[in-house]
Image: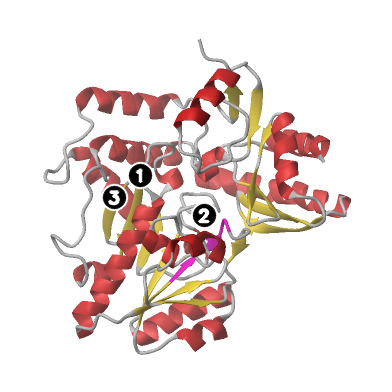
Amino acid sequence: MWNSKTCMDYAEAAVLHTYNRFPVVFEKGQGVYLEDLEGKRYLDFGAGIAVFALGYGVKEYNEALKEQIDKIIHTSNLFYHVPLAEAAGKLKAASGMSRVFFANSGAEAIEGALKAARKYAFLKDGRTDHEIIAMKGSFHGRSIGALSVTGNPHYQDPFRPLMGGVKFAVFNDLESVKEQITDRTCAIILETVQGEGGIYPADPAFLKGVEALCRDRDILLILDEIQCGMGRTGTYFAWQQYGVKPDIMTCAKALGCGIPVGAFVLNEKTAAASLKPGDHGTTYGGNPLACRAVSAVFDLFEKYGILDHVKEVAPYLEQRLDGLVEKYDFLAQRRGMGLMQGIETAGRPVGEIVSKALENGLVVLSAEHNVLRFVPPLVIEKEHVDEMIDKLERSF
């Protein structure tokens, strides 16, 4: 019979130590609450790092997956299956883009997007020395390709040499992007809202300016919506609020609401002149179980009006967080979009606040080295915001 201590001890002896895990063993969840092995409840404002958008124990979601398990879980991409067609169609409709490739994770989606961009450029001019411009402070994943476009030396340095041909500009500084462009630039990649880098939304003028640069020079615009996408900012994808449109978009996390799935989505121009059969593949990506999850997520977003709900509750979360910033000297600034919010701390270690909040039955996350990150399930109500503020203040 497991208890928290035996589980943690066993895991520490068997699992590669790449995470400094918090001393909690979660067993189950319901709604916006998690419960550990000893029965203690936690209000969840982390959602498995922005994954569980619909909350826990959603009957329709669970039943859809159980039904699919009883039918077929995996076939490989050598064959068609109905969940693939349904999921791709719904993602295509939500994004207004053209072609979908399902992967297993956000990092894999980034890898595919980078390959598509380089193949597009290769077919255009036959050169193999193309460059990609990424942003300082960005985070795109931990595979070698994704690390190569992640603008943080802390993540990169132990694993050099990385993929070549990557240059870094300053996020929200259009002139710095212009300075990096050459005749070899094939793509510009950025997060519409920087997540791990500290919750920084793109400035509208900056994002529109980058899009204009790409259109003028036939450079592909890649927007990473892995964390900020799937309704978190009040639209399916954050870029839809900016009046821009990417050539390639990546998404994951809440796309499957717990089932590991990611995707990169291309517009017609890029899809028609980039990856062809044999250029890219995956054994598990887009299998029937993952695609059934994606399809169910879109159905439930529509059934429960998730996008409208985010627009309703997010201003209240912003208001309550702004109140904390005004009240406490060690809280410097709130920033974010929708239900992706951060508060910058000054003079008090953010890790200590996160740990103390956990003791008080609240899951919050950190970002960068000094930002409290709030990415709750998208189904939270105002009463949950009030409960979170109360637990957080007790933690302060």
From the image, give the main secondary structure of the stretch colored magenta. strand
Separation of marks 1 and 3 at Cα, in angstroms: 7 Å
Separation of marks 3 and 2 at Cα, in angstroms: 18 Å
Q: Which residue is mark 1?
A: 261
The kind of residue tagged 2 is Cys
Q: Residues within 10 Å of mark 2 (few under 14, many from 20)?
A: many
Question: Does residue 258 lie above or below 67 as drawn?
Answer: below
The part of the chain drawn in magenta is 189-196
Q: Which residue is mark 2?
A: 228
Identify the secondary structure beneath mark 1: loop
Residues under numbered marks 1 and 3 in contact, where contact means CB atoms less than 8 Å apart: yes
Membership of 192 in magenta stretch: yes
Q: Quadrant of residue 146?
A: bottom left
Q: Which residue is mark 3?
A: 102
Q: What quarter of the picture does the C terminus occupy?
A: top right
Identify the secondary structure beneath mark 2: loop
Q: Residues within 10 Å of mark 1 (few under 14, many from 20)?
A: many
Q: Residue at x 49, y 29 (%)?
A: 13
Q: Quadrant of residue 247?
A: bottom left
Separation of marks 2 and 1 at Cα, in angstroms: 15 Å
Residue 311, image x, y percentages: 59, 49
Sooner in the amino-acid sequence: mark 3 or mark 2: 3
Question: From the viewer's perspective, is the residue at label 2 or at label 1 nearer?
Answer: 1
